[in-house]
Image (cartoon, coloured by chain):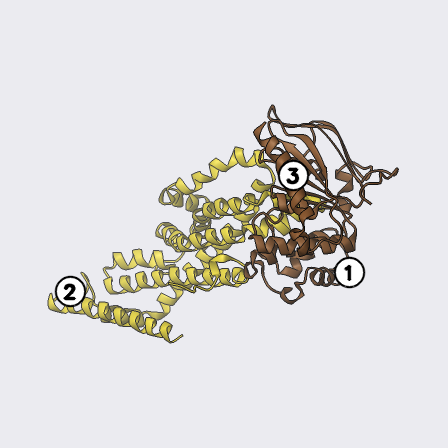
Chain colours: A brown, B yellow
């Protein structure tokens, strides 16, 4: 699934993209192809533009130069098949958990019955059906993030764009959510573009890691993660895992030092 | 709950002590009622002229409430326009501050000159004085929305009106209520000020401001005190009504109404 290049249109195709902010080059000549079903993580020091690249793919911010296609469409036109998950849960505090999860369908004027059904389904998926009527302020950080994920999944996206979604959580909550994310990934067969600055998280989740350097932001290395699927908590204890983390760490150190 | 009723009892005791002290000062110094009436004399004056006191209270209540309500409607509408068009906000917003700095005692005679004396003119004065806090606070609430939330709505292809109604407006509710609370307090002052200039279309009958002026001219100091107490209570009542609506609208989700666990 990971190694074979599909002759069909790639899910995400970034070709010679440059992004400038008021003259400063944030991203320089980025080319990246993500095939259907891949879990690709962008890893790099702060200021390398990994979040910016994610914003470009989502169409929330336009590229200065180059071309981005999502399933053969412009990012704006591909919004229906994409969902963005932010670093903060960004829940609407005045809505209950269920109302937050149903937001996307509501904005798209989906029928009430369908909405209800999907919300229940998504809350079961992230194991939060027992807090459907609660308000965000009553939830823990990890629970809020799961609500945010449920909200992103409710419109059945094919592509997930995740911008350091677990960065604000403690390590235990983060590990648990990583495992949960992979369980869903195996079930739902998404394509994922994930941003993090945590090495262990990147290695655990990804089928491929893309390492970026800063000033200007550019891709320096790519690293395949050939750990067997399904990955569980035990995967983190294997010697192969340690090996890849060491390898990635060495590459990343080279990038930061340079 | 027990603690709360104890607190209430204590405040009532403090009130009783203050009233007792006041009465004692009047008695011990043999002050005449026209100079400083005791609380007893004030209560008697209030009872004696209860119908006209209640009528004045009714008139001022109508003026202040109508002016406040109109300022909320107009203020929210203006704030929504400001939130939607940034350039317009930058162009016009500074001038709304003039509403706050303009001396209302100077404006009131003008308004009465234009609108003619009576309840309507006083309502307009109240409206003017209440408008600025509503506009300022609501605008702030409408524009200070987390950028990621805007992005979230954009990812779902939300229309501008969906962003306004489902994101900006609910986000502005807490600051809108802050504005209303400020305006509720000054709405009664606005009403009284307006009435000082043109509270009445018939001699001897008008709102609290007019009645205060009248009682002052007639040297009915006891009744004057009763009117002042009535105006103060009215301001309090406005404030608490707004607090109640605020609680109703926000207690489910907003931090301000989270039950206090520690003191």
- Give residue B166's position: percent from left, percent from top: 64, 51
Q: Secondary structure at mark 1?
A: helix
Report the chain holding disc 3: A
**Extreme residue toward the front, this view:** A239
Q: Which residue is mark 3?
A: A248
- Give residue B85's position: percent from left, percent from top: 60, 37
Q: Quadrant of residue B82?
A: top right
Q: Secondary structure at mark 3?
A: helix
Q: CA distance from mark 3 to mark 1?
A: 44 Å
Q: Nearer the viewer, residue A167 or A150?
A: A167
User: Is B245 above or below relative to B44?
Assistant: above
**Extreme residue toward the left, this view:** B29
Report the chain holding disc 2: B
Q: CA distance from mark 2 to mark 1?
A: 78 Å
Q: Quadrant of residue B188?
A: bottom left
Q: Which residue is mark 2?
A: B32
């Amino acid at each position: 699934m990971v190694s074979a290049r599909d002759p069909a249109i790639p899910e995400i195709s970034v070709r010679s993209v440059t992004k400038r902010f008021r003259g400063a080059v944030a991203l320089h000549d980025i080319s990246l192809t993500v095939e259907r079903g891949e879990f690709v993580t962008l890893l790099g020091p702060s200021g390398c533009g990994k979040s910016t690249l994610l914003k470009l793919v989502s169409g929330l911010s336009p590229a200065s130069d180059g071309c981005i296609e999502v399933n053969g469409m412009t990012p704006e036109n591909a919004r229906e098949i994409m969902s963005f998950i932010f670093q903060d849960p960004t829940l609407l505090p005045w809505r209950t958990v269920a109302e937050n999860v149903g937001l996307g369908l509501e904005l798209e004027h989906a029928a009430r019955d369908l909405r209800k059904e999907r919300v229940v389904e998504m809350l079961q998926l992230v194991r939060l059906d027992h807090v459907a009527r609660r308000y965000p302020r009553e939830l823990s950080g990890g629970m809020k993030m799961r609500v945010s994920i449920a909200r992103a999944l409710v419109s059945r996206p094919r592509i997930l764009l995740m911008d350091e979604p677990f960065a604000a959580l403690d390590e235990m909550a983060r590990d648990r959510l990583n495992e949960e994310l992979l369980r869903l990934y195996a079930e739902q067969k998404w394509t994922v573009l994930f941003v993090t600055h945590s090495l262990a998280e990147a290695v655990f989740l990804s089928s491929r890691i893309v390492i970026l350097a800063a000033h200007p932001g550019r891709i320096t290395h790519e690293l395949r993660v050939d750990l067997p699927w399904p990955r569980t908590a035990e995967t983190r204890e294997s010697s192969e895992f340690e090996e890849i983390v060491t390898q990635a760490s060495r590459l990343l150190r080279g990038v930061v030092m340079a | 709950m027990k603690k709360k009723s104890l607190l209430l009892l204590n405040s009532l005791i403090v009130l009783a002590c203050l009233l007792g002290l006041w009465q004692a000062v009047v008695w011990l110094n043999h002050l005449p009622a026209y100079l400083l009436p005791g609380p007893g004399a004030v209560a008697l004056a209030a009872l004696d002229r209860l119908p006209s006191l209640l009528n004045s209270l009714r008139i001022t209540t109508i003026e202040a409430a109508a002016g406040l309500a109109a300022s909320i409607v107009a203020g929210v509408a203006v704030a929504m326009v400001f939130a939607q068009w940034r350039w317009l906000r930058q162009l016009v917003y500074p001038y709304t501050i003039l509403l706050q700095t303009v001396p209302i005692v100077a404006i009131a005679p003008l308004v009465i000159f234009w609108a003619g004396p009576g309840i309507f003119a006083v309502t307009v004065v109240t409206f003017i004085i209440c408008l600025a806090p509503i506009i300022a606070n609501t605008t702030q609430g409408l524009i200070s929305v987390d950028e990621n939330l805007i992005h979230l709505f954009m990812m779902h292809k939300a229309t501008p009106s969906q962003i306004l109604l489902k994101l900006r407006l609910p986000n502005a509710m807490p600051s809108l209520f802050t504005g209303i609370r400020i305006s509720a307090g000054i709405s009664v002052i606005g009403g009284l000020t307006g009435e000082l200039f043109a509270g009445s279309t018939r001699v001897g009958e008008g709102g609290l401001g007019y009645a205060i002026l009248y009682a002052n001219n007639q040297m009915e100091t006891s009744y004057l005190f009763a009117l002042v107490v009535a105006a103060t209570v009215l301001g309090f009542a406005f404030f608490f009504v707004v607090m109640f609506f605020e609680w109703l609208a926000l207690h489910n989700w907003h931090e301000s109404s989270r039950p206090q666990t520690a003191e």
